[in-house]
Image (spheres, helix red, strand yellow):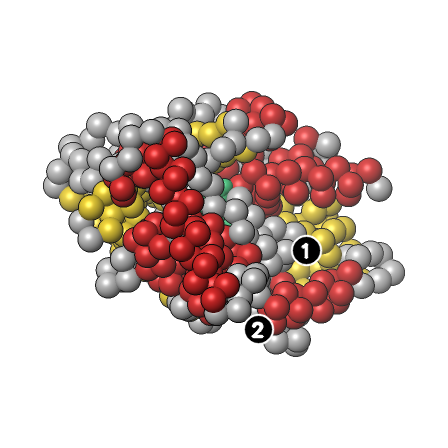
């Protein structure tokens, strides 16, 4: 194979696929490569017993943007799935996000006025204790949570979960992580406040297939295992390995930015998740797609029962336990750790990237940001519009 593409896109995740979709629509020739053996990045689902198993963690599409919602609905149909996770603390179940159901389960209060007064009593207790210690502004996540919601909810529903998720004590985590803790004085278990929400009918692979319809793709190709040269005179990238040999005018890179620069400015930190998947000989294990385990002694943060995302009626069910862990080379980098040290290092990589107009760095790994899916789509739309305008 030896041909000139307008764009060679490294990474077939939501960013790369959306970019390719729009570029192709404008008559551009794209090749999307991915080092994994499948397309779709972290949206990829595997079919097990007719159930679409979210292989890289549960994904729920939600957005406030009509533009994004209309766009994804023009490609695939979405179901009416509404995320309403349940928290299990020492065997007792609580609804999330924190709402009248939670307050009833926690304190037995029946009315918003009763709940409000209980919340205020709990907050006042925390604030008085902090003031007595000479603390005016919460110094860490624990103090922030106590001041916002009080000790009962913090100790039962936040502390254990957050410490497992981030691998650090809440007293060592920055307060800003939970600057906003939604508290609702209505009986509403919908986790998100967004106007639009759902799961693609038939699973996320349908969305990726629709995005990449008519786009050339190659899997099992690691960009870093290829030889890459750039010819300044012709303005063309040349990328080849033992099985392919291509040229392109512009490179879109959606992998890890520190890896692209050979870790020359240091390694960015991540949290990863180990997924333990099980098929059970029963139709319904937990009655909900998402159950969080908020106590510290249970090593996983949550159990996902995939069939409930699509109202599955199969005889069997598939569950996944999620165990967060520190990232090391070879693991999937899931959550960027946007603390001061990492953000400063990323800013230096960004400066380096800005001097290279032959490559566009984008997506959650190249931008080192925790992006929800709707944000990635908006980002891809904006970047491709800007690029095609030139
Ligand atoms: P990715 O999906 O990571 O795609 C990058 C692709 O690049 C990958 O396929 C990778 O294999 C490929 N690649 C990397 N390096 C190379 C290389 N050297 N050569 C070739 N290919 C390479 N968002 C929501 O809106 N709702 C949710 O409920 C939600 N849940 C999430 C749960 C988890 C556990 C995680 C981690 C994320 C979740 N997200 C959710 C966020 C969502 O996954 C991202 O917004 C989206 O996947 C980002 O797409 P991307 O294309 O930027 O990155
Ligand atoms: N969180 C918590 N208890 C829960 C669920 C979430 O304390 O039962 C906190 C925790 O600090 C977590 C943050 O809320 O890191 C965001 O969690 P969410 O599940 O909303 O987002 P995700 O982890 O999918 O980004």
* Residue lying at 32% horizontally and 56% vertically, measured from the top left: 155
Q: Nearer the viewer, mark 1 or mark 2?
A: 2
Query: Do we see residue 345 in this rendering?
Result: yes
Which residue is label 1 attached to? 361
The image shows residue 177 at horizontal and vertical percentages of 51, 56
From the viewer's perspective, is 386 left or right of 10? Answer: right
* Residue lying at 75% horizontally and 37% vertically, measured from the top left: 385
* Residue lying at 43% horizontally and 35% vertically, measured from the top left: 184
Task: Pick the residue in front: 35 or 66.
Answer: 66
Q: Is residue 114 above or below residue 168?
A: above
Q: In the displayed orientation, state which residue is furthest to the right.
A: 233
- SS label for mark 2: loop
Q: How many marks?
A: 2
Q: Is mark 1 within 8 Å of ligand 1?
A: no
Q: Using the image, tell me which numbered label, if any, was put on residue 273.
A: none
- Sequence-first disc among 1 and 2: 2
Which residue is label 2 attached to? 267
Give the quadrant of residue 19: top right
The image shows residue 14 at horizontal and vertical percentages of 55, 43
Q: In the displayed orientation, state which residue is furthest to the left.
A: 281
From the viewer's perspective, is 229 left or right of 132? Answer: right
């Amino acid at each position: 194979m030896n041909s000139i593409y307008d764009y060679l896109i490294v990474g077939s995740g939501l960013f790369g696929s959306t970019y390719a979709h729009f570029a192709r629509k404008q008559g551009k020739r794209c090749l999307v490569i991915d080092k994994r053996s499948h397309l779709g990045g972290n949206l990829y689902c595997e079919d097990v017993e007719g159930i679409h198993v979210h292989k890289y963690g549960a994904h729920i599409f939600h957005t406030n943007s009509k533009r994004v919602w209309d766009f994804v609905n023009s490609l695939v149909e979405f179901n009416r799935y509404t995320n309403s996770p349940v928290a299990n603390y020492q065997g007792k179940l609580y609804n999330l996000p924190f709402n009248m159901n939670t307050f009833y389960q926690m304190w037995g209060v029946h009315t918003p006025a009763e709940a409000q007064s209980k919340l205020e009593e709990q907050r006042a207790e925390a604030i008085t204790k902090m003031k007595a210690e000479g603390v005016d502004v919460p110094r860490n996540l624990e103090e922030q949570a106590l001041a916002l919601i009080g000790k009962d909810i913090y100790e039962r529903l936040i502390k254990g979960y957050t410490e497992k998720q981030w691998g650090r004590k809440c007293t060592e985590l920055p307060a800003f992580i939970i600057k906003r803790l939604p508290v609702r004085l209505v009986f509403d278990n919908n986790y998100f406040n967004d106007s639009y929400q759902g799961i693609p009918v038939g699973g996320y692979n349908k969305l990726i297939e629709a995005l990449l319809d008519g786009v050339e793709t190659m899997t099992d190709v690691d960009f870093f295992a290829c030889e890459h040269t750039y010819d300044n005179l012709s303005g063309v990238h040349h990328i080849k390995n033992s099985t392919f040999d291509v040229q392109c005018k512009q490179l879109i890179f959606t992998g890890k930015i520190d890896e692209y620069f050979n870790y020359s400015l240091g390694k960015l930190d991540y949290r990863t998740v180990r997924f333990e998947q099980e098929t059970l000989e029963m139709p319904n294990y937990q009655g909900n797609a998402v159950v969080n385990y908020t106590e510290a002694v249970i090593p996983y943060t949550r159990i996902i029962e995939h069939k409930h995302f699509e109202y599955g009626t199969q005889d069997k069910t598939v569950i996944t336990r999620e165990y967060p862990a520190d990232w090391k080379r070879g693991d999937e980098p899931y959550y960027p750790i946007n603390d001061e040290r990492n953000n400063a290092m990323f800013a230096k990589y960004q400066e380096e990237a800005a001097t290279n107009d032959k490559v566009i760095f984008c997506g959650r790994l190249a931008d080192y940001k925790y992006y929800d899916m709707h944000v990635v789509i908006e980002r891809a739309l904006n970047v491709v519009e800007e690029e095609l305008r030139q």
